[in-house]
Image (cartoon, rainbow, N blue to C red):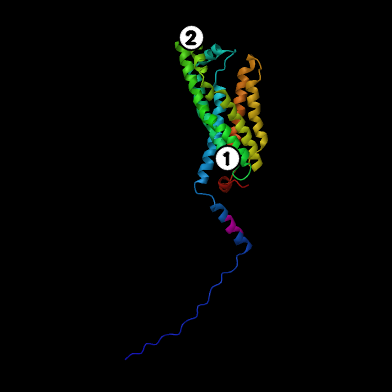
Amino acid sequence: MTTQITPPAVPVIPVIPAPLSAEDYAGYAVTEKKSSAPPSTGFRRRAVGISAAVGGVLVASGFAATVWERAEGKLPYLDSLVVDPMRSQIAAILLFFGYMGIASVLLAFTAMTRSRGRVLGNVALAISWIGTLALPGLLVTDFYDLAIRQELPAETAVRVSDAAQNLPLAVLIGGPTTMLVFAGMVLGAVAAWRAGFFHWSFGLMIVASVAVMTVPLGQQYSAVANIVSGALIGLFMITVGIAALRMTDAQWAGGAR
């Protein structure tokens, strides 16, 4: 009969890891900080930044491509559309897609103000979001006005165009909401400045743009004034896009500077 001999138990010696050095701890902290942002954050940040900047280029180009009227009134406006119909359509398309970039500007400000400037950032988004979504659709009227002027006598074309604008609910998608868009962009710039991602002085470009559009400078300067106004809006959108692209993914996800 074979007797089984049980070997003596080997004591388990716990392995105590060596303490982290300062360099290792710093690298670990950086890794944790980088991994705190969701994987899709980088794509979204770049998409918003690029679309805001591209939108700014399109807005400035659309204003420059527009054939501006040389006198006040509805008929000079309708006549300006038929001076070069293809150019008028191209300008409308550029502005249609360019104005879509304003939504990206507001989204960038929303990301910048997650931690600081939230109240002002929320106000900026609240007052301008509806107008921002409606603004591109206003360019559809350029095609209708162009066709009206091409197909109808001058007096009839003016009467039809005025009748469309004078409908009681037309004001809801026109002037007041557009002005709120500009106000929202200025407030968003101030909120992003408080958060440390933008500078409030860039908002003066929007203020100057509105002033150039509203202050009477004489019809001989109207085309130049409108082109300058569009260039200021476009430059503002480009600066917001660049600011978004310069943010890190962690800053975009959390808003902390």
Image quadrant where residue 54 sits: top right
Q: What is the secondary structure assignment of the residue under circle 2?
A: helix
Residue picked out by circle 2: 156
The location of residue 162, given as percent across then percent down, is 52, 14
Residue picked out by circle 1: 110
Looking at the magenta stretch, what is its main secondary structure? helix
Q: Are marks 2 and 1 in contact (CB under 8 Å)?
A: no
Q: Earlier in the sequence, mark 2 or mark 1?
A: 1
The location of residue 1, given as percent across then percent down, is 31, 91
The location of residue 209, given as percent across then percent down, is 63, 26
Can you say whether 255 is above or below 105 in the image? below
Span highlighted in magenta in the image = 26-30
Amino acid type at mark 2: Thr
Amino acid type at mark 1: Thr
Can you say whether 106 is above or below 88 in the image? below
Q: What residue is shown at x 54% (from left), y 11% (from top)?
A: 75
Outermost residue to the right: 201
